[in-house]
Image (spheres, rainbow, N blue to C red):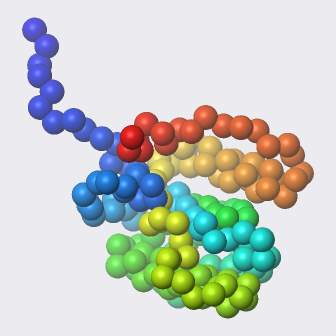
Amino acid sequence: MKQLKLLDRKDLRFFGGMLLNGRRKNQRPLSHRHPIHLVLRSDKAKGTASFFRFRKYIDDMINTQAKKFGVRVYQRAIQSNHIHFVLKIHNRELYRYFISALTGAIALRISRGAGLKKQNRTFWLARPFTRILNWGGDFNGTLKYLTQNSLEALGFIPYNPRKNYYSRFSVG
């Protein structure tokens, strides 16, 4: 006889982004021992407000804020409308300060630099998406993915459509 499954366990390494739609808010799972894959996405970053246009400023801001809050950034990939990071944090509070300062500074600079009119909608599409990585294959695979993503965005290699791995975690 099989044991009944009383609780449906979900993967606790994923949090944020579109996964929050229609769900109750939980505390973001973070780890100070493992690296984290972080994605920031904006629906306003297109045309003159593209992240490509502000690439140098975004790089400088990431370095400044990471140094200020003790965050180690292993790799980043700046695309036209989203930014990927692989980083390591020391504690939850410093992560909160880091992400708040970084997202605010990027949104303010791009909105002003691109001449976007002040609107009631936010600059970012959703809350930052995070995934806790395991050291080894998971970490190295994510670094490879960021490199491939950057090369595709710059046009050095052709775009290779990928299966949406995160679809099983999304609502609907």
Q: Give the side of residue 142 with respect to residue 125, left or right.
A: right
- Rendering quarter of residue 54: bottom right
The residue located at (21%, 35%) in the rendering is 8
The residue located at (77%, 71%) in the rendering is 47
- Rendering quarter of residue 113: bottom right
In the rendered image, is residue 124 in sight? Answer: yes
Task: Name the spot of residue 88 as percent of width and height, x first.
Answer: 49, 66
Quarter holding the C terminus is top left
The relative height of residue 130 versus residue 164 in the rendered view (above or below) is below
The relative height of residue 117 versus residue 44 in the rendered view (above or below) is below
In the rendered image, is residue 98 in sight? Answer: no
Task: Name the spot of residue 51 as percent of width and height, x first.
Answer: 72, 72
Quarter holding the N terminus is top left
Task: Name the spot of residue 169 as percent of width and height, x first.
Answer: 40, 42
Q: Nearer the viewer, residue 10 or 147?
A: 10
Task: Name the spot of residue 91 as percent of width and height, x first.
Answer: 36, 73
Residue farthest along the top direction in this orientation:
1
The residue located at (38%, 44%) in the rendering is 171
The relative height of residue 19 versus residue 94 in the rendered view (above or below) is above
- Rendering quarter of residue 72: bottom right
